[in-house]
Amino acid sequence: MSTLYTINLINNSPTAQDFFFFQKPAIYTGGATVYCNSIYQSVLLPYANSGSVLTFECLMQLYAGAQTQLPNLAVGQASGFITSCQPVDLTSATPGVQTANTTQLSVDPALGLAPASYHDGVEPGAYRIITPAFNPITDVLNTGLAVQNCNGNRVLSSFINAEPSKNIDCQPVLSFYIQTGSYQAGTVINFSTSSVGCAMCDTTQGVTSFNVTYNPEGIWTVTGA
């Protein structure tokens, strides 16, 4: 089931500001380093001079994502180019309930993800990407969680480097963050740095709509709408 999350952002500082949105990285098994991408970016004029409000909407149908990684993955650079996504469901905590919790990655003849189906052995609250045998030197791939942003684009929110013949389990953490900066959607960010002094919209308690204000002092006000 998909849920629409809405964040209304006001810039109360005296100057135009770049803002970018990102999510808390998902929890992964089957890989090492977890990377995080910006999922949306925009410039917002001061509210006092413009009356402008930035409304960010994210349809949280969960997507498994895979992507051909660009060389020299680095903060501020795009994480990849060809991206494949498939809607998935999380494994139910209710015994006997089967969900479409697993997708299989293909590499040859081209990158792709199969429609999701049920597999045993996936932890409740997670989904699985099964990787085939492939050469990780010639086929460098990102796999992880993708989201659909307010432009309708599907973007890898967080990911790990895919390894051959692995079960990659992903447990999403549904929190959104806003920070000042010009990281465009699909570019790598440093989550540890970007999350310091940012606005956090915590959806884990069932709140789906937020009002966020960036104040002149550089601090944030976040309330449920």
Image (cartoon, grey):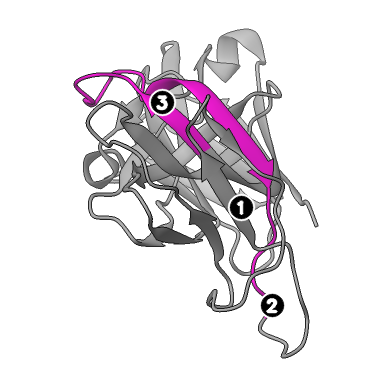
Of circles 3 and 2, the one toward us is: 3
Residue pictured at 27% horizontal, 37% vertical:
136
**Image position of 61 with respect to 75: above or below:** below
Describe the element under mark 3 as helix, strand or loop: strand
Q: Nearer the viewer, residue 119 or 96?
A: 119
Q: Report the Cα–Cα distance between label 2 and label 1.
A: 16 Å
> Quick one: label 1 or label 3, which is nearer the N terminus?
3
Find disc 2 in the rendering and name its residue: 92
**How many marks on residues?**
3
**Image position of 33 with respect to 44: above or below:** below
Q: Residues within 10 Å of mark 1 (few under 14, many from 20)?
A: many
Q: Is residue 214 visible?
A: no
Q: Nearer the viewer, residue 175 or 199?
A: 175
Q: Which mark is residue 68?
A: 3
Residue pictured at 71% horizontal, 24% vertical:
152
Indicate the position of residue 25 as horizontal and vertical percent values. 40, 51
Q: Is residue 130 visible?
A: yes
- Apparent side of residue 125 relative to residue 86 in the rendered image (left or right): left
